[in-house]
Image (spheres, rainbow, N blue to C red):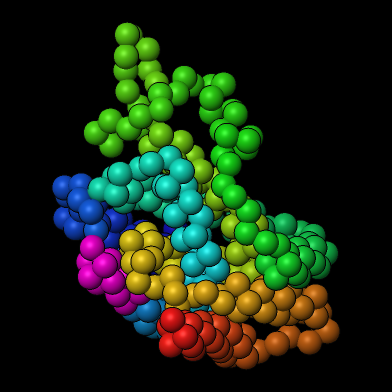
């Protein structure tokens, strides 16, 4: 095993240990200030790791890492809206939401590894997969622009039906536990169902984000580390949602452009390779423009009220 993987593993394990046993040793409602500070910590950690990438792999891989990090961070912001719906539907107390997201991130670390390395191997052996990924991203971009928001009804989903069939459910939370024992039987709580939906939503988002990040780099270390560092800070951003969501009112337009651009990049990969610096500039610009547009519209609405 390369020493880089050991360094990455050590950094992630240490950070997660601090997050669970130091920052959140006792369950509590996370304030906006705390959420923003934690978000700054995770972003700083992800950007600092780019220094290690530069030291060990050079300039080109560093730009790929930063592009992949920014891309995944932008795409994962869309998860926040899903988390809000999940916790609201299952009535998860605010002090226990971090626990659900923590275990959700651990699951994401495993599933993203499976998807990323499987995707890279598929492209290595079947080059035409690149075009399939490109088409998937373009379709996703169009859907993002045209699909209206729908109500959240988990009881109609396959995940809920399978969970209900496999293990009995109890419609109440108790001390933040995923399972409770009553009358000698084990029952799942809404906490466990919320975790299932957090995991399944990440798997669905990975269908877009994994092909997108593979379009940026084919280096497994760069692809995986940039992906995971972007995901790690997602929980803190969720708790800052009340303060930051107004900044992303038009984010879906920016994400649609990003997915469409990456899809075209993959389709053109055998004809013309778009420089990774251009990808970084366009992704950053799309996010910036969507945020600025959101702020301007919000101020105009406030001035009219």
Q: Main secondary structure of the magenta part?
A: helix
- Report the front residue among 159 and 212: 159
Residue 60 visible here = no
Quadrant showing the N terminus: bottom left
Locate residue 267: give its quadrant. bottom right
In this rendering, the answer to whether 18 lies above or below 282 is above
Name the residue: 65% across, 89% down.
275
- The magenta segment: 31-44
Quadrant showing the C terminus: bottom left
Residue 221: in magenta span: no
For this orientation, the residue located farthest to the top is 183
- Report the front residue among 248 and 69: 248
Residue 175: percent from left, percent from top: 24, 33
For this orientation, the residue located farthest to the front is 305
Name the residue: 57% across, 34% down.
155
- Report the front residue among 142 and 14: 142
- Report the front residue among 1 and 80: 80
Residue 91: percent from left, percent from top: 38, 41
Locate residue 195: give its quadrant. top left
Residue 156 visible here = yes
Labels in figure, total: 0
Name the residue: 35% across, 29% down.
172
Residue 14: percent from left, percent from top: 26, 58
Residue 143: percent from left, percent from top: 73, 64
Determine whether, in the image, residue 246 is placed left or right of residue 60: left
In this rendering, the answer to whether 182 lies above or below 129 is above
Determine whether, in the image, residue 291 is placed left or right of residue 122: left
Residue 36: in magenta span: yes
């Amino acid at each position: 095993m390369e020493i880089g993987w050991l360094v990455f593993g050590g950094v992630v394990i240490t950070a997660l240990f601090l997050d669970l046993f130091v920052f959140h040793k006792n369950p509590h409602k996370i304030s906006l200030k705390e959420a923003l500070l934690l978000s700054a910590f995770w972003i700083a950690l992800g950007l600092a790791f780019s220094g290690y990438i530069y030291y060990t792999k050079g300039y080109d891989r560093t730009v790929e890492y930063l592009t992949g990090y920014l891309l995944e961070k932008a795409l994962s912001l869309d998860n926040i809206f899903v988390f809000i719906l999940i916790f609201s539907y299952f009535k998860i107390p605010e002090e226990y939401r971090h626990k659900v997201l923590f275990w959700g991130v651990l699951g994401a670390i495993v599933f993203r590894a499976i998807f990323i390395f499987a995707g890279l191997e598929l492209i290595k052996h079947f080059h035409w997969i690149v075009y399939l990924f490109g088409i998937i991203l373009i379709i996703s971009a169009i859907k993002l622009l045209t699909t209206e928001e729908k109500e959240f009804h988990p009881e109609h989903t396959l995940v809920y039906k399978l969970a209900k069939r496999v293990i009995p459910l109890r419609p109440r939370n108790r001390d933040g536990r995923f399972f409770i024992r009553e009358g000698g039987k084990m029952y799942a709580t809404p906490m466990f169902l919320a975790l299932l939906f957090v995991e399944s939503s990440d798997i669905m988002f990975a269908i877009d984000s994994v092909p997108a990040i593979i379009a940026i780099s084919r280096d497994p270390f760069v692809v995986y580390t940039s992906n995971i560092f972007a995901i790690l800070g997602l929980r803190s951003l969720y708790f800052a949602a009340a303060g930051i969501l107004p900044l992303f009112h038009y984010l879906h337009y920016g994400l649609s452009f990003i997915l469409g651009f990456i899809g075209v990049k993959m389709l053109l990969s055998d004809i013309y390779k778009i420089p990774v610096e251009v990808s970084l500039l366009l992704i950053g610009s799309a996010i910036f423009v969507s945020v600025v547009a959101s702020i301007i519209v919000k101020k105009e609405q406030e001035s009219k009220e």
